[in-house]
Image (cartoon, coloured by chain):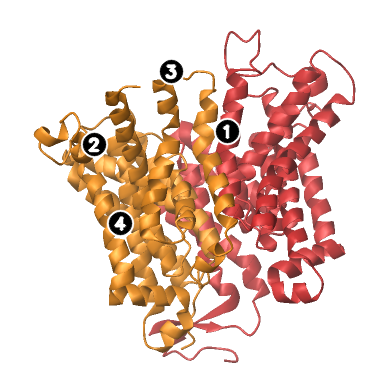
Chain colours: A red, B orange
Amino acid sequence: MRLELVKRKQPSRAMLYLTPVFSVLLTMVVGATIFSLLGYDGPGAVWNIFFVPALDPNKWQDLGIKAAPLILIAIGLSVGFRANVWNIGAEGQYVIGGLAGTGVALATWQMEGWWILPLMCLAGVAGGMLYAAIPAFLKTKLNVNEILTSLMLTYVSVQLLYYLMRGPWKDPEGFNFPQSRMFTDSQMLPEIGNTFVHYGVPIAFLVALLAWFILSKTVFGFEIRVVGAAPNAARYGGFNRTRTIWTSLLAAGGLAGFAGILEAAGPYGQMVPQFPTGYGFTAIIVAFLGRLHPVGIMLAAIILAISYVGGEIAQSSIGLPNAASGLFQAMMLFFLLATDILVNYRVRFSGVRSGGAA
Amino acid sequence: MNEAILIAILVTVVGAATPILLAGLGELVVEKAGVLNLGVEGMMLVGAVTGFAVTTMTGATFIGIVAAGLAGAGASMIFGFLTLTLTANQVATGLALTIFGVGLSSLIGAGFVGQTVTVLGPLFPPALAEHEHLRILFGYDPVVYFSFAMTLVVAWFLRRTRAGLILRAVGENDASAHSIGYSVIGVRYMAVAFGGAMAGIGGCYYSLFLTPMWAERLTAGRGWIALALVVFAAWKPMRLLAGAYLFGVVMTLELHAKAAGFEYVPPEFLAAMPYLATIVVLALISLRKSVGAQAPACLGKPFKPST
């Protein structure tokens, strides 16, 4: 008896939605096995990373805070990924967005007013968009691969951050630590009620719902879907590849920049050299695991947020290394890509009569 | 600037160029077979940590290097299985491999942080290797000479051998290669494994020779520079050699500037130079119209034989 793959007449919608669930389950099983083989408490690792944060209401606020930037960045990336535009430099756009907003905060230091925070957010969005405009320009004008340019710019942005923190933007009253001034009350995102959840969290979920509406109900959303699925048809339909590249990159850059300033004005309350924590890369996993769909992305962001929070719990409770959650996250993407084949192919055991119409 | 400093700078350029040359050669062969593996950075990290771990445990650098190559090839087989057998998207799978490599290497390396290894000395006897001038030619470790040898081997293999011709055919026109009886998937598996092994060896050059120690994300994006290098070289091994040394110069600018007593430029700017230079170089070569035409025609496209 051997396995055989038979092409489906139509992609299976059920598999499209089931495979992300499969991949999370497979990650738990295989992850537990691998960590047991490495000499850790494998089942304990899975329990701590995937279940403890979800079951403990004390951790839910933390999940929202971690999910918010992932949602914003992944929504932006999903627009490009649908159209085969591979922006993998969201981390850099996130950093530049945070820096641009910080620039406004430092310029308005000791000022007060309702307009300061919106201005910081605008600067963040604009910063991210401008930074994403570089790969967009190079791609459309010179046909330079956006994968490489957007990633190279991430490394450049981190060096710019280090420079600003060490030099011009260093807090003059900060005992020579390489970090910016603390933001003032007019420059910080307030927290909701008596929680420690900042307003960036509901904003991220609202943006996802808005994106859902735009992508499913507008001509622009239709265009993005067609350009990705059938580039030739899109050309005949008058949809323009250059415009798609620009909108994909600007949307991704703008949302990553927005996520950056919301993080700086929210949980951080200042700019620090440790600001880039890899949200821009994890958001790639979120976008795929969420099937490039806004609702899926919200769910996937919560799962990835669980793995972040759970990774911290596992570190203190069973001594799992910090890197473990990253490994679990990568495994989810691997298993998703592996099970993707089930969307277009059916598994048949040859030698055994298969059920249904063949 | 005196002669001794000049020679010292040259030695650092060779050090910076060697790992990206090795990883770039591997990726060049992979891409010639029509596969785009963006997981170079991840495979380099897996190689770096494996090479370091095995060397500290066995005390033999050579065994560490071989282990690094095997580990890189092993990591590349995950990519191979997903993209070649399961026809998964190559871009997404390559990215996943890099994220995986970062996580796996940090996990394995956690127990090795702070340890150090003895660096393997030059290949040639001290009379040559430590000679005031001759050390420009003879003062390097065996891996450097291995990288030169591999450049020639890859160039010869692709242009002069039957197997190389088949590999190029698979990358240029998979359907035809398949129809005249060559195993497209088999050839691509071998190319991907070779790419992984070379990335693994390139990665361990950081942990065993340049640093020499293990730290998280030790390769600092050099895997991506190796990928850019392949485009820069227009998929030609000898141009890859030239490109690697050009980037070697840019990557050691920080050291050069210090040696020249040049202190006005912020060090962060110099650290960002290799990445900025990559962008500028990619933009410049794209001005030549023929570049797109030089890429293997089937690059990045999945192949599913209709049985």
* Distance Cα–Cα, label 4 vs label 1: 33 Å
Label 2 Cα crowd, 10 Å radius (few <14 / some 14-19 / many 20+): some
The residue that appears at 68% across and 28% down in the rendered structure is A267
Q: Which residue is mark 1?
A: A158
| 1 vs 2, front mark | 2
The percent position of residue B209, horizontal first and vertical second, equals 27, 37
SS for dot 1 = helix
SS for dot 4 = helix
Give the letter of the chain under mark 3: B
The percent position of residue A58, horizontal first and vertical second, equals 65, 34
Q: Which residue is mark 4?
A: B151
Circles 1 and 2, Cβ within 8 Å, touching? The answer is: no
B95 over B306 or under it: above or below: above
Amino acid residing under circle 3: Gly
Amino acid residing under circle 1: Val
Task: Decide if residue B96 is on the left or right side of residue A150.
Answer: left
Give the letter of the chain under mark 4: B
Give the letter of the chain under mark 1: A
Task: Decide if residue B267 is on the left or right side of residue A84.
Answer: left
* Distance Cα–Cα, label 4 vs label 3: 35 Å
Is tag 2's residue or tag 3's residue first in the polypeptide sequence? 2
Label 3 Cα crowd, 10 Å radius (few <14 / some 14-19 / many 20+): few
The foreground one among B112 and A254 is A254
* Distance Cα–Cα, label 1 vs label 3: 25 Å
* Distance Cα–Cα, label 2 vs label 3: 23 Å
* Distance Cα–Cα, label 1 vs label 2: 35 Å
